Amino acid sequence: MTATPRILITGANGQIGTVLAAALRCAHGPEAVLGTDIVAPPSSVLASRFTLLDVLDAPRLRTLIAQHQIDTVYHLSAVLSARGEADPRRTWEVNVTGLLNVLEAAREGLKVFFPSTIAVFGPNVPPEDTPDDAVLNPSTVYGMSKASGENWCAYYHERWGVDVRSLRYPGVIGYQSQPGGGTTDYAVEIFHQALATGSYQCFLSADQRLPMIYMDDAIRATLEIMAAPAARIGRRTSYNLQGLSFCPADIAVAIQAEMQRRGMAVPEFSYRPDFRQAIAASWPHSLDDSAARRDWGWQPRFGLRELVADMFDHLGTTIPCSV
Ligand SMILES: NC(=O)c1ccc[n+]([C@@H]2O[C@H](COP(=O)([O-])OP(=O)(O)OC[C@H]3O[C@@H](n4cnc5c(N)ncnc54)[C@H](O)[C@@H]3O)[C@@H](O)[C@H]2O)c1
């Protein structure tokens, strides 16, 4: 029997952290998971184990790791692509120095999860089935910080044997939480606005195809890569992770069809691209994730129809225990 891990999550109040924390608490028990973030969580989550932590505060990070006998860190805190452009220096600091603080602490023997992103790619890669090892020439400070972070992960693994594992998440879509300033946020907002107001104006072009993933698949991938035997992790920079690919017009049609099927008023969608369109245009349309499939058995479960139906089944409900 394997021992229960002692987990610390940074950025635990974010779109993914909220759901990952719940999944880890379900898997290992509430006492096994310490959520941390720079801001306090909503009152519904406050009952769980939580403490404030700025990832730039390395001494406090080390104190918490020692106090709570942490052996695994899910390092989610970051400033994301669209928000990051407002303050590039701060974005670099939080995303790179924050990661280095975690990796330094991990030299004592911690296991680490580091989420990377499709934003590490720039416009000069093959846009379809972009390979893991395509040249990284990102167009945002967020992408630059994550590309650098991937290399730091490989370096700490190579040099000090840190067991750090990483996925390049595409845009993550879920009903459980609100996105935090990324370029793919439209794909969550569109559901909430369709239900609340019957219309949505998208900030990307109707035909801007991007890789996306349903939250359930993203969380399952995270748990699966962390549970895989170390010998199966052939990439210590980061793995491409593909869920599905679609453009705003595709999801708009799928939402209209699903709402009609449910006897609801059919919403109207329009498109008014802003600065985020240029960021999206620099990213791949789809990723080649064959290494993740080969090394640790990755398989996505949600296509567009299943995703849209599941969103409508669950919007307005609380986070379930299993994903
Ligand atoms: N959501 C996506 O579509 C997506 C896609 C690719 C990669 N990712 C990565 O996954 C991770 C989680 O993303 P998310 O969507 O949950 O982001 P989010 O913006 O919703 O959450 C990030 C959290 O980090 C916290 N944070 C910011 N600065 C901090 C600091 N100095 N110290 C401690 N906490 C701090 C924020 O308060 C926030 O709760 C990030 O590393 C992100 O780069 C997300």
Image (cartoon, helix red, strand yellow):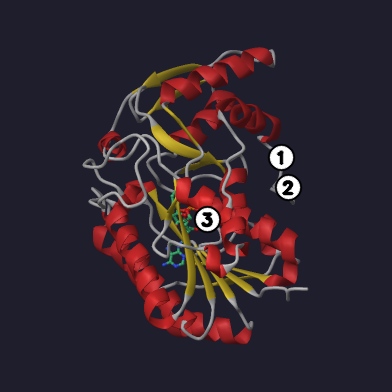
Q: Residue at x 73, y 47 (%)?
A: 320
Q: Nearer the viewer, residue 286 or 27?
A: 286
Visible in this render: residue 36? Answer: no
Q: CA distance from mark 3 to mark 1?
A: 35 Å
Question: Vertically, is 321 above or below 150?
Answer: above
Queried on whether the Cβ of the residue with tag 1 lies below 8 angstroms from ligand 1, the answer reads no
- Residue that carries the numbered disc 1 in the rendered image: 317
Q: CA distance from mark 2 to mark 3?
A: 29 Å
Whichever of callouts 3 and 1 sits on the residue coming sooner in the sequence is 3
For badge 1, the amino acid type reads Thr
- Which of discs 2 and 3 lies nearer the camera? The answer is 3
Helix, strand or loop status at disc 1: loop
- Residue that carries the numbered disc 3 in the rendered image: 295
Q: Nearer the viewer, residue 240 or 74?
A: 240
Question: Vertically, is 310 above or below 61?
Answer: above
Q: Residue at x 62, y 51 (%)?
A: 220
Tell me the crowding category of disc 1: few under 14, some 14 to 19, or many 20 or more residues within 10 angstroms, Cα based. few
Instruction: Check whether the beta carbons of the residues at disc 2 and disc 1 lie within 8 A of each other.
Output: yes
- Residue that carries the numbered disc 2 in the rendered image: 320
Whichever of callouts 2 and 3 sits on the residue coming sooner in the sequence is 3
- The answer to whether 151 appears left or right of 311 in the picture is left
Q: Residue 226 at x, y = what percent? A: 58, 63
- Which of discs 2 and 1 lies nearer the camera? The answer is 2
Q: Quadrant of the N terminus?
A: bottom right
Q: Quadrant of residue 246?
A: top left
Instruction: Check whether the beta carbons of the residues at disc 3 and disc 1 lie within 8 A of each other.
Output: no
For badge 3, the amino acid type reads Asp
Helix, strand or loop status at disc 3: helix
Q: Residue 138 at x, y = what percent? A: 25, 50
- The answer to whether 235 appears left or right of 254 in the picture is left
For badge 2, the amino acid type reads Pro
Helix, strand or loop status at disc 2: loop
